[in-house]
Image (cartoon, helix red, strand yellow):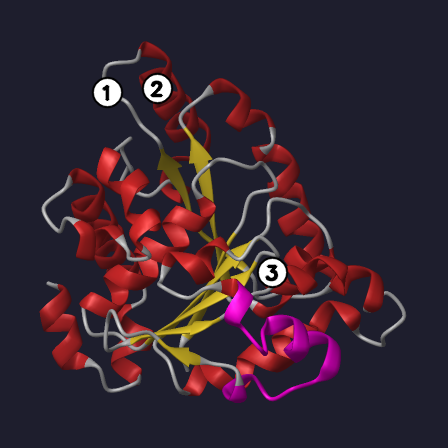
Amino acid sequence: MGKIIAVANQKGGVGKTTSSINLAASLAALEYRTLLVDADPQANATSGVGFDPKDIENSIYECMVDGINAQDIILQTNILPHLDLMPSHIDLVGAEVEMINLPNREEKMKDALRPLAELYDFIIIDCSPSLGLITVNALTAAHSVIIPVQCEYFALEGLGKLLNTVKIIQSRLNENLEIEGILLTMYDVRLRLSNQVVEEVKLHFQQLVFDTIIPRNVKLSESPSFGIPVILHDAESKGSISYLNLAREIVEKNIEAINGGGNEERKDAAA
């Protein structure tokens, strides 16, 4: 069984999509079978790996609302051999209204993704910047959640609200949901505030915080305009190296489950 990881934070601009794309690409570069799921109506993760959302015929919207088989909408990326995409479309913005009267509406994404866990080592879900029904679906489907936190003061304010939402999901919809880790993003070593936020988060959340910190990096900002992850835009950039380190950290944390799937050779590649 592959690990399904949601990347979620109701606050916008904290690096969710950047982290989803580049974590998925880094896992694929380490030769783990990886599926990137775009669960955001803005479809930035879709365009970030080289697809034009306007050309998408079937997306995660059709999976959740119309019950289309998830395997039928998966697209193979041409950028990395082990990276696939489940695309999004602007139609997803209306899914919450259309699903409101459906039975088990919080489990539509789970029904779509859980069978795919046998085909992939990792499934990374890029969530929208809200705590609406689509994000609830993602957290219900996931085994764990990564919470990106921007190294700025206001980013801390929404963290408690999201952690409370995770507790509600755990108690009512997905008792096995875990926090994979809190990921500090947009770190600028020159700024006192960035260092204060890092200290504050590590003080309060300790082992929940990833060792890897994602810096502000021009190459990270540039790569979406080329429709490729940063590892293909500039493999030696600080952003690329940081996401590779994050991927290795996640692999190390989940290595026993991965070994159970017969991926010992890829463990050596990750090391």
Question: Is residue 67 shown in magenta?
Answer: yes
User: Which of 109 and 207 lies nearest the eye of the viewer?
Assistant: 109
**Side of 258 relative to 205 (left or right):** left
- State the CA–CA distance, disc 1 to disc 2: 7 Å
Q: Horizontal and vertical percent for residue 130?
A: 66, 45
Identity of the residue furthest to the right in this view: 101
Q: Tell me the residue that label 1 is attached to.
A: 189
Q: Is mark 2 on a helix, strand or loop?
A: helix
Residue occupying image coordinates x 40% and y 21%: 197
Q: How far apart are marks 3 and 2 (CA)?
A: 28 Å
- Residue nearest the viewer, comparing 61 with 206: 61
Instruction: Provide the residue span drawn in magenta.
Output: 54-72
Label 3 secondary element? helix
Q: Is residue 211 visible?
A: no
Left or right of 91 in this view: 126: left
Q: Which of marks 1 and 3 is nearer the N terminus?
A: 3
Give x and y (percent) for residue 54.
Answer: 54, 65
